[in-house]
Image (tube, rainbow, N blue to C red):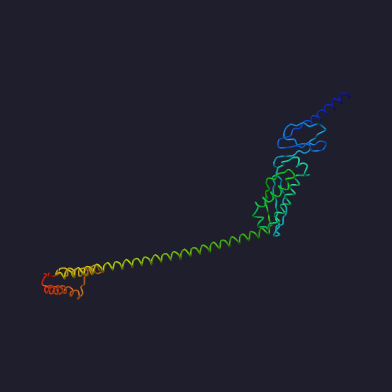
Amino acid sequence: MGSWIIGVVLVLLVIIVIAKLVRIVPQGYEWTVETFGRYTRTLSPGLHFLVPFYQAVGARMNMMEQVLDVPSQDVITKDNAVVRVDGVVFYQVLDAAKAAYEVANLEQASLALVMTNIRTVLGSMDLDESLSKRDAINAQLLRVVDEATHPWGVKVNRIEIKDIAPPRDLIDSMARQMKAEREKRANILEAEGFKQAAILKADGEKQSAILAAEGKKEAAFREAEARIRLAEAEAEATRMVSDAIASGNINALNYFVANKYVEALKEIAHSPNQKMLLLPMEATGVIGSLAGIAELAKEAMSQQGSAKIVPPPR
């Protein structure tokens, strides 16, 4: 019986010795080794052997990136507005020994540090800045907290403010302010639209008037030019007739007078009352005057004695 108990004790002692001798560190963790309570080295993931009862595992540190929830807290902004803020922190232990022995409770210490700096950063901003510059707040918190946790062997990768909630009455005031601001913008835009429409309409009328005046000016210029051309042509024709008469060709005078007379009758015939042609008494005189003019021309030519007088066409 006594030998059986001794055997069991020896087996248990062997099991305990083996358990203290062999250490397997899982991936993502690092263990610290203490010799009589003093840190000596760090075990990386894998199989390790320790001296039983002489060396022991100290702290088992998680080396993977971890998430730390920051609970909601009330923060007073620079303009004395109370807002409720919460967030989340992503951090990773880079030095297991420092994380194990430089700070008593790493998670609690990091959380307290983050909450304190949230109050500090938001307390230096007014409410509008705290609501509109969340990226700037995150960046400033990350810089300050990462610098503060560096002696602990910790790297803070990100800090995100999840929510900044003003009180209900302040939210209602902000909603009314936003509504008033949007109505103001709408009224301004509407007034700008009417203004632009009036300007465009006036500009269009101005351009139309300018174009109409330029058209009238061009038409008057062309009409004057046409009258000048016509006068020049008539003057040239008169000169040519006068030269012909002076040279003894009485047919030119007859042709000139008859042509004018025909043109006058043509104008009368194209009048709205062309179906009824009324000749005034003076017209018959004009017709009769053709013979008189011809006679005068004959006398003029007879005095010169060098032309043959041809009667005008009837």
Q: Is 234 above or below relative to 57? A: below
Which quarter of the rendered picture does the C terminus lie within?
bottom left
Q: How many marks?
A: 0
Q: Is 160 above or below relative to 48? A: below
Residue 178 left/right relative to 4: left
How far across and down, in percent of the image, does residue 173 sit? 66, 60
Picture quadrant where residue 66 is located: top right
In this view, the residue in front, 305 or 71, is 305
How far across and down, in percent of the image, does residue 167 sit? 69, 57
* Whether residue 85 is visible: yes
How far across and down, in percent of the image, does residue 112 sit? 75, 49
Looking at this rendering, what residue extends furthest in the right direction?
2
In this view, the residue in front, 14 or 176, is 14
In this view, the residue in front, 212 or 197, is 212
* Whether residue 314 is visible: no
Q: Is 13 above or below relative to 260? A: above
Residue 201 left/right relative to 178: left
Residue 176 left/right relative to 266: right
Which quarter of the rendered picture does the N terminus lie within?
top right
